[in-house]
Amino acid sequence: MDLVNWLAAVQREKGHAAIMGILNVTPDSFSDGGRFNQMDAFKRQAEQMVADGVDIFDVGGESTRPGAEPVSLEQELARVLPAIEWLHETFALPISVDTYKPEVMKQAVEAGANFINDVNALQAKEALSVVASLGMPVCLMHKQGEPKTMQLTAGYQDVVGEVYQFLSERIATCVQSGIAQESIMIDLGFGFGKRFEDNCLLFQQMTRFTDLGCPLLVGVSRKRMLGQIIDAERVEKRLQASVTAAVLAAQKGAAVVRVHDVKPTREALLTAKYLG
Ligand code: YH5
């Protein structure tokens, strides 16, 4: 089933936007004991998400957060592959891999991933051809700059116009490279090289991106822009703001919301479905 049809099926069956649950694979500790415990914690988190009604897993090796140091290919593979293999063996749910490295994309798909979530919008060398030959759906995200420094240098003349132009060009390039238009999603990239006011404007004007003809994925869960609105430094304090933002995004037409807190998000989306 192609991506657009799968999303339509989720909408139909559940009556709300698809919920993408964020599963970060944390660095291995040096001892085997630590490694076992981390995999164990990962499994329990995934099981809880399934019980809470997650629609798609997003597995990431934590290499793209603002301020983060890049992770080596070997490190990323060692973190992400066992996690994807286990999810694939254990649940009948789609799995996306959050990576910009073509080699990780390839091996993740062999391990059972069925969706590429690339914060770099397939701009790495070989990424376009790898995804085209894998035939997997992909999410193209906008960012300005590189994760390590992007929050220090962010600036736009017209953030909505520039993000629109970028995504429009990337969609065209993907299609020219043999990726089916029906398997492309887009993401405005909240917090990726954007100031507070840029994030707010993009969120407010999200519906302007619908005419690009690709389903929209929105990831704002626990992000600093929400912390700035409610004056909460600690991520654990950002739950209500995250859930509110997920409901608003769905109302503005987002097909997928990428979240940490599946259960409260699902309850809010269901409530909005009946009362909205
Ligand atoms: C996204 O928006 N984000 S990784 C900082 C936080 C909270 C969360 C503490 N991968 C996105 O999740 N993929 C990431 O504040 C993504 N869209 C897509 N498609 C950053 C992240 C986060 C960072």
Image (cartoon, rainbow, N blue to C red):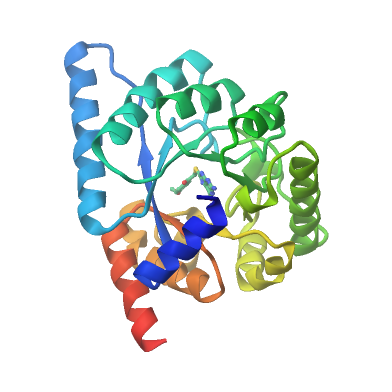
Would residue 61 be found to the left or right of residue 118 on screen? left
Identity of the residue drawn at 74% across and 52% down? 167
Identity of the residue drawn at 45% across and 33% down? 62
Would residue 121 be found to the left or right of residue 111 on screen? right
Would residue 236 be found to the left or right of residue 146 on screen? left
Rendered position, 208 above or below 61: below
Rendered position, 134 above or below 16: above
Q: Is residue 198 visible to the viewer in this orientation of the structure?
A: yes
Q: Farthest residue toward the front?
A: 1
Image quarter where the C terminus lies is bottom left
Q: Position of residue 44 (x, y in %)?
A: 19, 40
* Total numbered circles: 0
Rendered position, 15 above or below 199: below
Q: Is residue 17 visible to the viewer in this orientation of the structure?
A: no
| Residue 36 position by quadrant | top left
Q: Position of residue 169 (x, y in %)?
A: 81, 48
Identity of the residue drawn at 50% across and 30% down? 63
Identity of the residue drawn at 81% across and 55% down? 165
Rendered position, 275 above or below 20: below
Q: Position of residue 98 (x, y in %)?
A: 50, 37
| Residue 236 position by quadrant | bottom left
Q: Position of residue 71 (x, y in %)?
A: 51, 22
| Residue 212 position by quadrant | bottom right
Q: Farthest residue toward the bottom?
A: 275
